[in-house]
Image (cartoon, rainbow, N blue to C red):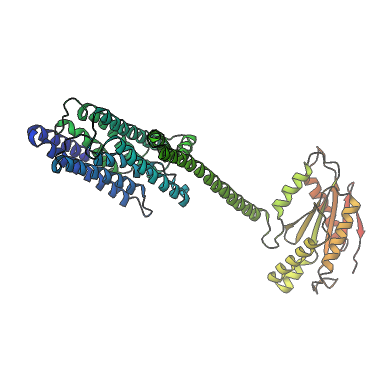
Amino acid sequence: MKAFIAAAALVAVHAITVTALPGQGMAISYAFFFLAGSLAIGASLHAWRRSGAQRDGRWLLLTASLVLWAVGMLLSARQYYWLANDNPAPGDSMFLYVLYVLPVLVAVSSAPVPARKRWALSIDLVLASLLGILFYVHTFSIVSMQGAVGSTQENDIVRMLDIENFALAIAALLRYLATDRADDHYFFRSVAAFFSTYALVVFYYNHYVALGDHPEFGTAWDVLLVIPFLALVLTASARQSQRHWHPSVYLVRFVQSASPTFLALSVLGLGLMVIRDMPVLGIVGAVAAVLGIGLRSSLAQVDLVAEEHRLAQRRDALEGLVFTDSLTGLANRRALDERLLREWHRPGQREPIALLMIDLDFFKEYNDRYGHLAGDDCLRTVASALFARCLRAGDFLARYGGEEFAVIAPATRLADAVALADNLRRQVEEQRIIHPLSPYGHMTVSVGVATLQPHATGGPLDLLNAADHALYQAKHEGRNRTGCIRDERVRETSTSDA
């Protein structure tokens, strides 16, 4: 409230002073213009300094626009006082009044912070440089250094100012209404406040004061030009306010995605404006704008594909951690359950599914004799042996838990499943892992085999229970053997090869 009262007081003092001293009205107005511009520059720099450790460079772009405007006002004062030129549209100051929007236009066209890339900055710099050239050419195609030679040229330059001011005001308002970040909300609130008021007051001032039949410079009307800068000071100096609305995610993403085209569209529009008088430069501007938009879109798509690939890799890595046993590197129990469920419900399943439950014999005694680190090494060796040989395409090996492993063998009948189990059992025996506490003298495994035809009344749990029952029977019969179950009957199919 205090800042608002101070701003209102400054406006009142300006109006009262120029009214009381009409002979010095222009000098007084210039003093207040520079004062208001300096306050706005200071407020913008203050906002930049307090934007955190990662300074928001957009405030510096806004500051650069304000400095260009102040230089334009300085050139206008020079024309009026030192060169005794009372033309309302001298070329040098008009060019600065046109050019000052360029830095803040780059800020309004910027993508969200995470999406700002060096290649995007390079494209923006090229387009901004070309836009500055087009501004210069178009401005001085309308007015000379001394100013406009007639009312037609004066109206043309005013129309150009109206277009750029209102276009930038609309762009800033769109960015302000579609913000989802606190720093964006803070910055675009100030930019929208400045350019909305500036577009309105400059439109009125240019059309009804500067271009009137009797220009009223140095009067109370000059107070209008102070108001936008004070609006910027108030919004930039105030704390970051909490948003009172929450735009839809679609609107936010749409505006953020479309904002980089503001700069390119400005180049395109101005290129089309000068194409009649300077066809080569106009065509270059139009082509550069189209290429800029196309190149931005293509590079953004490349970045999007690269980001999707990176996220997919990260997702796969996380899934690998979720579904992989950290000790052996095999699939874990969760992966086994999901694979078994998928095989059970596979469309068109006509063949039985075989499940092999593999258990290390006398593993507790091995751990007690050699310790858990040696036990872990033993598990890794057995896992490598099972994984390296004997499995067929489509078979799925996992660590079931503890010293147990499991193999899912889709479309496998009982005889083939038993043969696979015997091959795996012999493969472990061939590793000759010394185990003095085993009656066989080395590490062996027992295997339980079960096959079931998937059907609507049962589920994978039936197959798990059957294979576990078969394993129990194999261990009960003396270990180092394969047991199988079919029609609820368990029979020994092979004995030790040792």
Using the image, determine if residue 133 lies above or below residue 87.
below
Where residue 239 appears, as percent x and y from the top left, is: 30, 44
Between residue 231 and residue 150, name the one nearer to us.
150
Residue shown at 32% from the left, 34% from the top: 165
Residue 449 is left or right of residue 29, and the answer is right
Figure quadrant of residue 166: top left
Residue 296 image position (x, y, % from top left): 49, 44
In the image, residue 192 sits, relative to residue 396, either above or below, namely: above
Determine the residue positioned at 37% across, 55% down. 53
| Residue 290 x/y as whole percent | 48, 39
**Quarter of the figure with the N terminus:** top left
Figure label count: 0
| Relative side of 315 to 435, left or right | left
**Could one spot residue 367 in this view of the protein?**
yes
Q: Which quarter of the figure is the C terminus placed in?
A: bottom right
Residue drawn 58% across the image and 52% down it: 310
Q: Nearer the viewer, residue 72 or 41?
A: 72
Question: Residue 157, image x and y in percent?
Answer: 29, 33
Q: Picture quarter containing residue 217?
A: top left
State whether residue 479 appears in this view: no
Asked which quadrant contains residue 445, the reply is bottom right
